Image (spheres, rainbow, N blue to C red):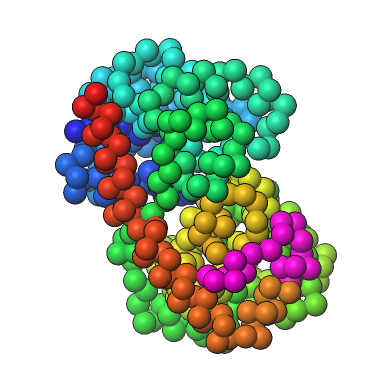
Amino acid sequence: MRVLHFYKTSFPDSVGGVEQVIRQIALGSNKHGIHTDVLSLTSNHVPRTIEVDGYKIHRARLDFQIASTGFSASAFWRFSQLAKEADVINYHFPWPFMDLVHFATRINKPTVVTYHSDIVKQKNLLKLYKPLQNKFLSSVDRIIASSPNYLVTSDALEKFAYKVSVIPIGLDKSSYRSPTQDNLNYWKALFSGRFFLFVGVLRYYKGLHILLEAAKEIDYPILIVGAGPIEAELKTQAVELGLTNIFFLGLLPDEDKVALLTLCYGVLFPSHLRSEAFGISLLEGAMFGKPMISSEIGTGTTFINIADETGLVIPPSDPIALRQAMTYLWEHPERAAEMGRKAEARYWKYFTAEDMVSAYAKIYRELAQK
């Protein structure tokens, strides 16, 4: 069986939550006898097709972008050719250009949509796009939501609930490169003692401006790993607030990220908008047995982090509540450690890549046999 995944960006050109999901599915699919192709767009001068870890990545040239939506003239032909060889097509939503390619190429193959997020920021453009969105979601055979929380709170998914399956995003811990002792010692020397950790792309919906407000009046070290569009803005805010306990570390190699996940006291995930549909780095915190702090936004974040069991859940956009949550964990180390143990147990029960890929493989085979 051959499955084609289609999304605007992919690993290794881009490393984000959706790209991570596609990669985890691709890595695990070989064990199920499924060959994987991934088609995405890029503006870089790179080979059009490469093979990575047993699956193929194909690129079409990114011509321009409007409101975070990439467009590509060559993608129509590339998609059409790859789709003809595929048994199932797995789209990754949202990406309005993908809808256009779907209808323009008229490929008669079984189709799955992994529904990663509602469209939240571009509300005015959504009014124009909504008819196409509904037509696209109506036309596909199956829709996959990443959590029951998101399914019941998404207006867009409500009318298609009859064909929605919930498959939680899963991670393969063995695919994370273990840090060397020298690497661990390096970070211990830089940040001795306890510290909180945030990992992710620095985007508007991550709630990091709220975290900086919360960091006032406390002196717990808070490490921020990642880069992104609002990095300069956040650094300016930290300076204006006079914060000396915030450390922007930028993008780091995976080995360093894993070292910090291993060493940190707890994981912070203050995302405050529904654009944060799941929270891969929150799940990484659970996978490494750390207590978590997240906001209740009606998405998968509170499917990962169960209030007062695996961590603390606070109202969104509330820096005082976030500060109080950090203080509670800091002042109750035994309770924090217990939450971390329960977080890791929940990861092994619900969020392994093996379980995720098995569920996807089952759906692929059901659709291919129709």
Pinpoint residue 148: horizontal percent, then vertical percent: 50, 47
**Farthest left residue?**
33
Please name whichever residue, 303 or 111, is drawn nearer the observer in this view of the structure: 303
Left or right of 66? Residue 58 is left
Left or right of 192? Residue 74 is left
Q: How many marks?
A: 0
User: Which residue is drawn at the image coordinates 53% and 41% (left, top)?
Assistant: 151
User: Which residue is drawn at the image coordinates 64% and 73% (left, top)?
Assistant: 222
Pinpoint residue 285: horizontal percent, then vertical percent: 49, 67
Please name whichever residue, 36 or 46, is drawn nearer the observer in this view of the structure: 36
- Above or below for 92 versus 13: above
Quadrant, the N terminus: top left
- Above or below for 187 versus 359: below
User: Which residue is drawn at the image coordinates 70% and 79% (left, top)?
Assistant: 327
Left or right of 370? Residue 254 is right
> Can residue 320 be seen in this snapshot?
yes
Pinpoint residue 182: horizontal percent, then vertical percent: 38, 81
| Residue 319 colored in magenta in the image | yes
Pinpoint residue 154: horizontal percent, then vertical percent: 59, 38
- Above or below for 198 versus 118: below
Magenta highlight range: 307-323
Please name whichever residue, 90 or 242, is drawn nearer the observer in this view of the structure: 90
